[in-house]
Image (spheres, rainbow, N blue to C red):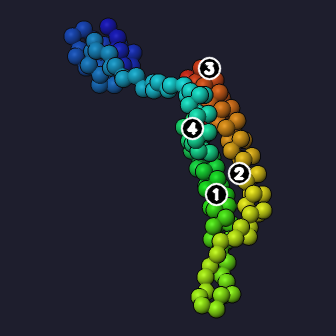
């Protein structure tokens, strides 16, 4: 009889292997460590990207890229919001009775110009998230592991 752990020959009636210490006649079973990874839906990825730029990347697993897109998108929104609201209030003291602030679209042109890169970022984000989901699913199908 041979040891199932190391393969050395055992004497008749020997309970434990003198080389590795494994009990004779038993096979040490190890639990399977295979983690099943599911594919990511391209439709859900596009839907997340449509709702908020960067969310599709986070869903696919490109978390740092997704949060970078979210940060840039938020900063562009904040600048446009500032230009349309706070930056457009002007102070006037032309009236003899009271001073007042009035709302004037002072930076409307600049705010509209910033919507162009915002829109381009949003479209690129949708396309790139879809492409990343396809790459992720392709890697899952061929290797069984995520690409990143």
Judge the density around disc 4: few (<14), some (14-19), many (≥20) Cα neighbours within 10 Å. some
Q: Looking at this view, is 1 or 135 the one in front?
A: 135
Residue receiving disc 1: 77
Q: Is residue 112 left or right of residue 61?
A: right
Distance Cα–Cα, label 4 vs label 1: 18 Å
Q: Is residue 25 left or right of residue 102?
A: left
Residue receiving disc 2: 118
Image mark for residue 48: 4
Could you tell me which secondary element the residue under label 4 belongs to?
helix
Q: Is residue 61 above or below residue 12?
A: below
Could you tell me which secondary element the residue under label 2 belongs to?
helix
Judge the density around disc 3: few (<14), some (14-19), many (≥20) Cα neighbours within 10 Å. few
| Residue 68 visible within the image | no
Front of the two marks 1 and 3: 1
Residue receiving disc 3: 142
In the rendered structure, are the residues bearing label 1 and label 2 in contact, judged by CB atoms less than 8 Å apart?
Answer: yes
Q: Earlier in the sequence, mark 4 or mark 2?
A: 4
Q: Residue at x 39, y 19 (%)?
A: 6
Q: Picture coordinates of residue 1 (x, y %)?
A: 32, 7
Q: Looking at this view, is 24 or 68 the one in front?
A: 68
């Amino acid at each position: 009889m041979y040891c199932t752990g190391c393969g050395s020959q055992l004497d008749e009636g020997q309970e434990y292997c003198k080389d590795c210490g494994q009990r004779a006649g038993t096979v040490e079973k190890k639990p399977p460590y295979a983690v099943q990874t599911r594919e990511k839906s391209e439709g859900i990825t596009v839907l997340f990207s449509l709702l908020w730029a960067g969310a599709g990347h986070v869903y696919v697993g490109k978390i740092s890229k997704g949060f970078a897109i979210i940060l840039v998108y938020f900063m562009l929104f904040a600048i446009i919001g500032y230009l349309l609201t706070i930056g457009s209030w002007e102070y006037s003291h032309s009236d003899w009775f009271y001073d007042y602030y009035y709302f004037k679209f002072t930076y409307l042109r600049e705010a509209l110009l910033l919507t162009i890169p915002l829109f381009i970022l949003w479209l690129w984000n949708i396309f790139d998230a879809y492409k990343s989901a396809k790459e992720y699913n392709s890697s899952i199908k061929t290797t069984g592991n995520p690409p990143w």
